Image: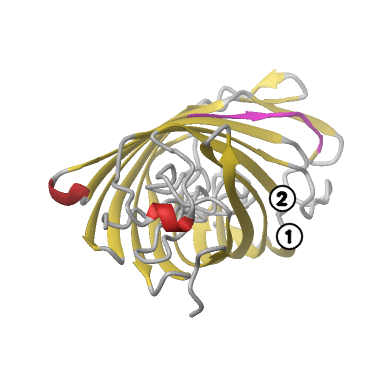
């Protein structure tokens, strides 16, 4: 039997527990669900593009805390001197299936949270609670992701995989144009991503994941009342190195460098292109073939025109499908 690969805490191998947790970090989950990975919402989880059995469903429940100067959407700063505390949750459902004999998946999700804080040096305080913008993802493994049933997966050996996905968020979250603090962003966003996962070392216990992605945004025509808010694409590259201590436990060191994202208010360039470097870590524990718990931490180390951010999250995954033994 191969070492468990835990795709996205994605799905779990019935015997070894295969998971695959995807993006937000959850982390900041502030306005968007970029994943929950994801401590920082812009993170994609390590081992997210590992192979996993098909005809499997997975429910993900997340709790996280973040301290920042943004809301759920960490691509936009509420105010440079804002000191905000966000308690948030995320619920996601994933379904893994065979498409042209390759592993593919669909994943809808919705975040919710309680955001409160103040402007440093003032008496201005505020709070809001509700749901954030819902997210939807479709993905596929282009190489190394042959569709296997749970029974067939028992003899699978880790191999290099190449995958791609498209995630978009819809403006379904709480948003009031007359308020500064909102959990929704009142705009659509689209995130294409390309990934390569390379397991290596004795028994393939090590894995190196590299991702390239970019966020594209539509206009918010009700920014601070009736202003127009536009943002250029925010691009990024990620590197994740992880090690399996046993078939039921692995840990990772995660990095992300992002750049771009200049904003325009009523057509006027704010000259605020971002350059950010995020550092994080994840510990993934498979309790049995159906249940996984994940602990995550993330912090923005460098943030030129970007958000200040630090936070942690706990995620729980439950998998079911044909071939899973009752627990």
Residue furthest to the bottom: 327
Residue 277 visible here: yes
Q: Position of residue 158 (x, y in %)?
A: 29, 45
Residue drawn at point x = 49 percent, y = 56 percent: 27
Q: Residue at x 42, y 69 (%)?
A: 289
- Callout 1 secondary element: strand
Query: Element at badge 2?
Result: loop
Residue at the right extreme? Answer: 226
Q: Residue at x 70, y 20 (%)?
A: 268
Q: Which residue is mark 2?
A: 134
Residue 41, magenta (yes or no): no
The label on residue 131 is 1
Residue 267, quarter of the rendered image: top right
- Disc 1 and disc 2: Cα gap in Å? 8 Å
Residue 19 showing in the rendered view: no
Q: Where residue 31 sits in the image (x, y, percent)?
A: 65, 50
- Find the magenta span and give its range: 213-222
Q: Are marks 1 and 2 in contact (CB under 8 Å)?
A: yes
Q: Is residue 217 magenta?
A: yes
Between 119 and 211, the one lying in front of the other is: 211
């Amino acid at each position: 039997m191969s070492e468990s690969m835990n795709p996205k805490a994605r799905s779990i191998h019935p015997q070894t527990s295969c998971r695959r947790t995807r993006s937000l970090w959850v982390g900041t989950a502030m306005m968007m669900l970029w994943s929950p990975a994801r401590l920082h919402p812009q993170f994609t989880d390590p081992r997210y593009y590992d192979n996993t059995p098909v005809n499997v469903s997975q429910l993900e429940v997340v709790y996280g805390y973040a301290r920042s100067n943004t809301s759920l959407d960490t691509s936009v700063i509420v105010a440079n001197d804002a000191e905000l505390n966000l308690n948030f949750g995320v619920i996601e459902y994933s379904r893994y299936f065979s498409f042209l004999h390759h592993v593919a998946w669909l994943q809808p999700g919705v975040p919710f949270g309680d955001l409160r804080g103040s402007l440093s040096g003032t008496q201005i305080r505020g709070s809001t609670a509700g749901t954030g913008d819902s997210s939807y993802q479709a993905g596929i493994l282009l190489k190394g992701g042959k569709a296997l049933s749970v029974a067939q997966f028992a003899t699978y050996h880790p191999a290099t995989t190449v995958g791609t996905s498209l995630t978009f968020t819809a403006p379904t979250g709480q948003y009031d144009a007359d308020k500064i603090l909102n959990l929704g962003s009142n705009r659509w966003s689209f995130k294409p991503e390309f990934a390569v996962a390379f397991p290596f070392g004795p028994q393939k216990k090590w894995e190196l994941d590299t991702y390239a992605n970019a966020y594209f945004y539509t206009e918010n025509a009700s920014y601070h009342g009736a202003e127009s808010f536009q943002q250029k694409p925010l691009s990024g590259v990620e590197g994740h190195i992880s090690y399996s201590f046993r078939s039921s436990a692995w840990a990772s060191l995660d990095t992300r460098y992002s750049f771009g994202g200049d904003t325009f208010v009523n057509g006027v360039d704010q000259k605020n292109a971002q350059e950010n470097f995020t550092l994080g870590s994840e510990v993934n524990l498979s309790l049995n073939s159906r249940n996984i718990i994940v602990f995550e931490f993330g912090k923005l180390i460098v943030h030129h025109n970007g958000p200040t951010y630090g936070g942690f999250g706990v995620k729980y995954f439950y998998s079911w499908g044909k071939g899973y033994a009752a627990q």
